[in-house]
Image (cartoon, rainbow, N blue to C red):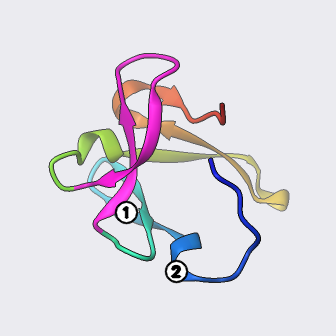
Amino acid sequence: ATLYAATGAADQRLKIHQVSGGCQLLSDLNNAYGLNIYGRGAGSVCDFFRVSGNERDALIDLLTVDATNNLYRIKMINHNLYLTPA
């Protein structure tokens, strides 16, 4: 993850798009790009890449950790792995 000061610009906003089998985390700047996993096991890299042709690797599930504080875990459904900053 790259951190920036919040400006409210579209390139800093993400949206959840529900699809068959889960959700996709898409860029608000260009909805063709979404969170995708590269690799098959723990330690694999996730980044924003074109979703078309990578639909299964873009499937996520948001699991509630603490709804009061808006805390969730992101699970990459196709690989049964959880997103963790490195």
Residue at (38, 26) in percent of width and height: 79
Q: Is residue 42 magenta?
A: yes
- The relative height of residue 19 versus residue 5 in the rendered view (above or below) is above
Residue 18's disc is: 1
Q: Residues within 10 Å of mark 1 (few under 14, many from 20)?
A: few
Residue stretch rendered in magenta on the structure? 32-51
**Quarter of the image with the C terminus in it:** top right
Amino acid type assigned to the residue bearing label 2 in the image:
Ala
- Which structural element holds mark 2? helix
Q: Compare residues 73 and 10 and report the one nearer the observer.
A: 10
**Quadrant of the image occupied by residue 67:** bottom right
The residues tagged by marks 1 and 2 sit, at their Cα atoms, a distance apart of 20 Å
**Quadrant of the image occupied by residue 5:** bottom right
Name the residue that disc number 2 marks: 10
- The relative height of residue 85 versus residue 14 in the rendered view (above or below) is above
Callout in the foreground (1, 2): 2
* Residue 76 image position (x, y, % from top left): 44, 36
Q: Is residue 25 magenta?
A: no
**Quadrant of the image occupied by residue 30:** bottom left
Report whether residue 73 is seen: yes
Q: Residues within 10 Å of mark 2 (few under 14, many from 20)?
A: few
* Residue 32 image position (x, y, % from top left): 28, 66
> From the viewer's perspective, is 3 left or right of 39?
right
Q: Compare residues 74 and 49 and report the one nearer the observer.
A: 49
**Label pair 1/2, CB-CB below 8 angstroms:** no
- Which structural element holds mark 1? strand
Residue at (24, 48) in percent of width and height: 55
Q: Compare residues 80 and 57 and report the one nearer the observer.
A: 57
Q: Compare residues 60 and 31 and report the one nearer the observer.
A: 31
> From the viewer's perspective, is 26 left or right of 3?
left
